[in-house]
Image (cartoon, rainbow, N blue to C red):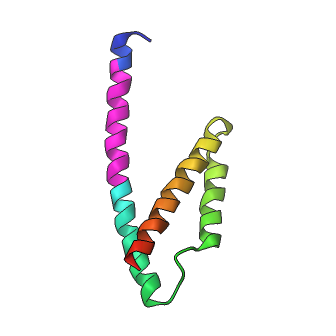
Amino acid sequence: MDNLNLDVVRKEISEINDEMLALFVKRMELSAQVARYKKANGLPTLDRKREEAILQKVVDNTVDEYRQYALRFFRTMMDLSKEYQETLR
């Protein structure tokens, strides 16, 4: 890969990073809504069955080469969401 191609790829990665950040912020905003609902209804922050279903979907929809990384990405994202929800409770 020469410099021109590397620059093109890095530009695309930067654009994806921007999109991912916007989606992350949106997800955290929705997590705040979930936290308020759970607090109002006396529900725990952790919904283990939902997390397991989400992670199973990641496993089912990710090729072997990226599966372990996708699982780590989603686990980290869910951990951050739970941590944030706890601060709102």
Q: Main secondary structure of the magenta part?
A: helix
Q: Percent from the top left, x then y, of residue 86?
A: 45, 73
- Vertical side of 9 occupied by 79: above or below: below
Residue name at image x 60 percent, y 69 percent: 50
In reply to whether residue 10 is colored magenta, the answer given is: yes
- Relative side of 36 to 51, left or right: left
Magenta stretch: give its range. 7-23
Q: How many marks?
A: 0
Q: Percent from the top left, x then y, of residue 84?
A: 41, 67
Residue name at image x 41 percent, y 80 percent: 89
Q: Residue furthest front?
A: 87
Q: Residue furthest top?
A: 2
Residue name at image x 34 percent, y 46 percent: 19
Q: Quadrant of the N terminus?
A: top left
Residue name at image x 54 percent, y 81 percent: 44
Of residues 5 and 28, the one nearer the viewer is: 28
In reply to whether residue 32 is colored magenta, the answer given is: no
- Residue 9, picture quadrant: top left
- Vertical side of 73 occupied by 8: above or below: above
Q: Percent from the top left, x then y, of residue 61?
A: 62, 48
